[in-house]
Image: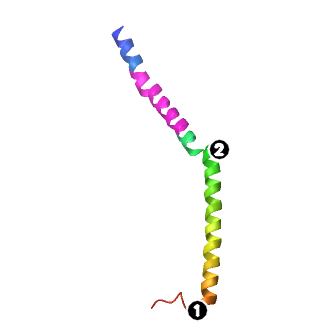
Amino acid sequence: MAFVVFVLGFLALAVVAPIAIIGHTIVRWRAIRTLSAEEERTMAELVSTADRLRERVANLERILDAEVPGWRTEP
């Protein structure tokens, strides 16, 4: 009887436990990989802000090019 318990315990540790660990890891990886609706909204807002800032920098550079030629050169 003790031998049967030992064999079943060994099989559980050698076969069932690794499968359960791998399955758990895959489920956690998939949950982390996807973005929630709030995270997608935040990402869209950040992209919009970056685009606006890029436009502002381009406008400032255009103004400086017109009013202060050579501002880009190092002293």
Q: Which labelled disc corresponds to residue 69? A: 1
- 57 to the left or right of 15: right
Q: Residue at x 55, y 92 (%)?
A: 70
Q: Residue at x 43, y 22 (%)?
A: 12
Task: Give the residue furthest to the top.
Answer: 1
**How far across and how far down the image is residue 14, in percent?**
42, 27
Of the pair 24 and 74, the residue shown nearer to us: 74
- Label 2 neighbour load within 10 Å: few <14, some 14-19, many 20+: few
Q: Between disc 2 and disc 1, whose residue precedes? A: 2
**How far across and how far down the image is residue 65, in percent?**
61, 87
Q: Which labelled disc corresponds to residue 37? A: 2
Q: CA distance from mark 2 to mark 1?
A: 47 Å
> 34 above or below 5?
below
Q: Residue at x 63, y 60 (%)?
A: 47
Q: Where are the magenta residues, as a range? A: 10-28
Q: Callout 1: helix, strand or loop?
A: loop
**How far across and how far down the image is residue 17, in percent?**
44, 27
In the image, residue 43 lies in the stretch drawn in magenta:
no
> 61 above or below 31?
below
Q: Quadrant of the C terminus?
A: bottom left
Of the pair 49 and 27, the residue shown nearer to us: 49
Q: Amino acid at mark 2?
A: Ala
Name which quarter of the figure residue 64 lies in.
bottom right
- 13 to the left or right of 40: left
Of the pair 21 and 52, the residue shown nearer to us: 52
Q: Amino acid at mark 1?
A: Pro
Q: Callout 2: helix, strand or loop?
A: helix
Q: Residue at x 36, y 7 (%)?
A: 1
Task: Give the residue furthest to the left.
Answer: 2
In the image, residue 14 lies in the stretch drawn in magenta:
yes
Name which quarter of the figure residue 60 lies in.
bottom right
Prevailing SS of the magenta stretch: helix
